[in-house]
Image (cartoon, rainbow, N blue to C red):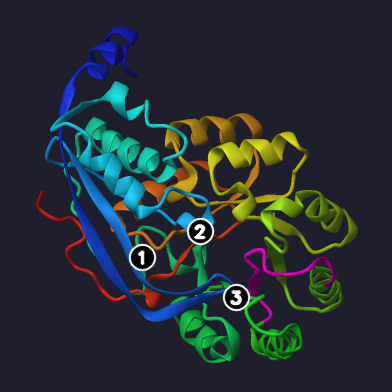
Amino acid sequence: MFSRRGAEARRGRGYRFDFRCYDRRFLQPLVTRYGIWSNREGIIICLAGYGYGEIAPISWFGSETLEQALDFCRQLPAKITEEMIFSIPDSLPACQFGFESALEAVGSGERTSLTYSPLRPAPCAPASYSGLLPAGEAALNQWEGLWKLGYRTFKWKIGVDAIAHELEIFDLLTRTLPPAAKLRLDANGGLSYEEAQVWLGICDDIQANIEFLEQPLPVEQFSAMLELSAGFKTAIALDESVATLEQLKHCFEKGWRGIFVIKPGIAGSPSRLRQFCQQHQIDAVFSSVFETEIGRQAALQLAAELSQPNRAVGFGINHFLAPYTNEKPRL
């Protein structure tokens, strides 16, 4: 542990700062109720020449925009202090995560060597990951390849097509998945209250292992999701409703005691997120924002500390992204 005097000295120390942008193509576009996502753009930052962090915003999910993050980086001096990092406002949660992660990397003193694996992310085995399936009928053709790689939990996007068509696909999918498989349904807030009731009712009645229905309703319908959570056996997880740490705290204070899907890359300050989760022992599922290996390592460190042992982490996404071998650029 650092002494208080040592911490104060470090807060005043300046760290050389630089950053670069990246643009990474999806091998298969991600289709959600928000539309089609074809490229992942973000920012790699570096402190002291070897402490790397990543800023990977998703503005439609509740973070700042990439332009706002770039504007913030551009206005910073060539040397920045810990005090400046811990003063990043809550309106820039992806920046908070990136800069604090870089600072932790500097503090560890390790000059990390990053490697890229297109389908088997390290350090966890695939069985510890939830493999993301494509929306629609394509899921029927892709789950088996992930199963052979070791994945046992799958996530399928719903609320993208007409409910009748998606229920037909869902019936086929649950009939073909092995009994040991777990399935997560992610609506991204795209269902009506009545549609959510239909999905939850069917999930309650079938024999398949449905782990939870994720964010069935829009963020502003929090009370309705509380009602649904109390009325059905199938668990509901909040995602968009708890995109940032401030939103997570708000939902907890309003009485949510179900599952929280946490995306560290846009949640905000890792240190404050760690403190909140440890204090309240929430049922957390940590999930990717399609970051590079730099952001992934920092996010998985939090997941290793704070996840429930029975919950696969939502990082089985590399099969959607084109290999990008220069994830730690020279800055």
Secondary element at tag 1: loop
The answer to which of 120 and 132 lies nearer the viewer is 132
In the image, taking residue 64 as reference, residue 214 lies left or right, namely right
State whether residue 21 appears in this view.
yes
Name the amino acid, label 1: Pro
Label 2 sits on residue: 60
Q: Quadrant of residue 237?
A: bottom right
Name the amino acid, label 2: Trp
Q: Position of residue 232 (x, y in %)?
A: 87, 62
Disc assigned to residue 290: none
Q: Identify the residue at image location x=44%, y=36%.
A: 269
Q: Is residue 9 magenta?
A: no
Disc 2: CA contacts within 10 A as few (<14), some (14-19) or many (>=20): few
Q: Residue furthest right?
A: 231
Disc 3: CA contacts within 10 A as few (<14), some (14-19) or many (>=20): many
Name the amino acid, label 3: Trp
**Comparing marks 1 and 3, which lies closer to the viewer?**
3
Secondary element at tag 3: strand
Q: Position of residue 227 (x, y in %)?
A: 86, 53
Q: Identify the residue at image location x=24%, y=18%.
A: 10
- Residue range in magenta is 179-194
The answer to which of 129 and 277 lies nearer the viewer is 277
Give the vertical position of 174 relative to 32 (above or below).
Answer: below
Contact? badges 2 and 1 (CB < 8 Å): no
Q: Position of residue 42 (x, y in %)?
A: 30, 57
